[in-house]
Image (cartoon, helix red, strand yellow):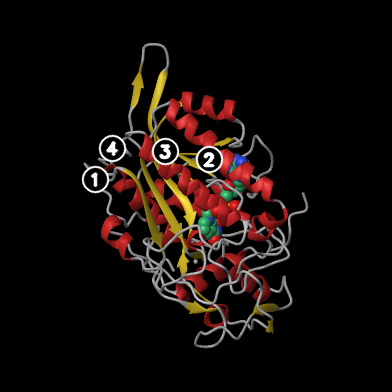
Amino acid sequence: MEGIRSDFPPSPDTDVGSPSTSSECDVPCVFSGPKRIFHPFSSKKVKNDGKKLIMDDYILVTGGAGYIGCHTVLELLECGYQPIVIDNCCNATCDGVESTPESLKRIKQITGKEVTFKYIDLLDKPRLLALFKEFKFNAVMHFAGLKSVNESIAKPMDYYEVNIGGTINLVECMKEFNVKNMVFSSSATVYGPPVKLPVAETHPVGKGLTNPYGKTKFFIEEILRDLANAEEGWRIMILRYFNPVGSHISGLIGEDPQGTPGNLMPYVAQVAVGRLPILSVFGNDYKTHDGTGVRDFIHVVDLAKGHIAALQKLSEIEGSKAINLGTGHGYSVLDAVKAFERASQRDVPFKFAPRRPGDLGCVYADPSLAEKLLNWKASRTLDDMCVDLWRWQSKHPNGYKTEPNGNLKTS
Ligand SMILES: NC(=O)c1ccc[n+]([C@@H]2O[C@H](COP(=O)([O-])OP(=O)(O)OC[C@H]3O[C@@H](n4cnc5c(N)ncnc54)[C@H](O)[C@@H]3O)[C@@H](O)[C@H]2O)c1
């Protein structure tokens, strides 16, 4: 997941998050009785067709073992949905094809609920079709994909194959089984260099994209828009994330980059915990208050709740709708480092390095459409993000491979 080019300042297309509350569902779920949701995308039924049970009303979560996916799975469970997770574990910790990814085991620890998991690669269309035969999905949340900017520059074809090919396979299966409700993980990267701040959904997209990863997000958006325009019945929420940071308040799940982190905050956390010696801050001559790049950091739990809000509003849209998920506040790299030092009570040594090509000076969202359409607003602060990230990182210096004693698992 990593490359030579890490992201300080992170460009919004990389994939750079206290909960002040518990993980109870606090997006507006509509309950028709205790613990039962009355909603076209959430009811729980089991039908008997005479021969075998057909399980109804599941939410398929692709890439649900990953960082954002698993936080969203947790929120789905808290809201009473039945997520079915698929993942090929190329970027998730898993003991083997038969075993449940570590992130999902932790979710059971937090919620007491079992998550159905299938080890499926999106490129394996026969297995994907078989899954759609087995479960009657109401909607799909599509997180799975490759997400490293640096890696995408080195291996563009992998990115086009997995991100675009995988999405096409998924959409073809959805079509075959008449599942036309989707929430897709896009990125603020589709905006390219901002011509106006804050960046609203009306900002031009697809211009000035400098890496294959970002282009795959833009191309997938275009594919989904074309599909929704061409055929009736599709309802697709395209969520453009800004910079997700942090972890669940339990400190049991979090971002676990393989290799050197490609994004700012996981890197900062690894410097604080002693895994990395020093942070390089690329560029201190941007036109920002302290010269370092400015980004819109959003707590991953707020982001996950934004997905639930989008799912619940699918029935109110027709076609496709792109929506920003950000806070609307820009913080510089140095602001973020200082916030992390406050949260962790540790020093984060850093040095300035020259700007890198492709990095942008200042990007932050106009989040007003999400508030209007989804009735959703990020509520967690940068300090919350840092406190929660530090809780995860300090408990798990080696990510999910950490033994209870803090050491690295050997097997
Ligand atoms: N994290 C960010 O900063 C960020 C920002 C904007 C957009 N996004 C997008 O959000 C989504 C989730 O991001 P994340 O940070 O949770 O990433 P992640 O890598 O932690 O999660 C993605 C998951 O997808 C799985 N996966 C990859 N290829 C697959 C395939 N072919 N078949 C099945 N599973 C596959 C991986 O194993 C991983 O568990 C991605 O699409 C990413 O591009 C992330």
- The Cα–Cα distance between marks 4 and 3, rounded to whole angstroms, is 22 Å
Amino acid, disc 4: Pro
Q: Which residue is mark 3?
A: 227
4 or 1: mark nearer the eye: 4
Can residue 73 be seen here? The reply is no
Question: Does the CB distance between marks 2 and 4 fall below 8 Å?
Answer: no
Q: Which residue is mark 1?
A: 31
- The Cα–Cα distance between marks 3 and 2, rounded to whole angstroms, is 12 Å
Amino acid, disc 1: Phe
Q: Which residue is mark 2?
A: 167
Under circle 1, the secondary element is loop
- The Cα–Cα distance between marks 1 and 3, rounded to whole angstroms, is 32 Å
Question: Which quadrant would residue 58 be assigned to in this image?
Answer: top left
Question: Which quadrant would residue 201 be assigned to in this image?
Answer: bottom left
Question: Does the CB distance between marks 4 and 1 fall below 8 Å?
Answer: no
- Relative image position of residue 233 (x, y in whole percent): 32, 34
| Mark with earlier residue (1, 3) | 1
Question: Which quadrant would residue 268 be assigned to in this image?
Answer: bottom right
- The Cα–Cα distance between marks 4 and 1, rounded to whole angstroms, is 12 Å
Q: Residues within 10 Å of mark 3 (few under 14, many from 20)?
A: some
Furthest residue toward top = 50
Q: Is residue 68 above or below residue 397?
A: above
* Figure quadrant of the N terminus: bottom right
2 or 4: mark nearer the eye: 2
Residue sitting at x 46%, y 48%: 221
Under circle 2, the secondary element is helix
| Numbered label attached to residue 40 | 4
Between 380 and 188, which is closer to the camera in this rendering?
A: 188
Between 343 and 312, which is closer to the camera in this rendering?
A: 312
| Mark with earlier residue (4, 1) | 1
Amino acid, disc 3: Leu
Q: Residues within 10 Å of mark 1 (few under 14, many from 20)?
A: few
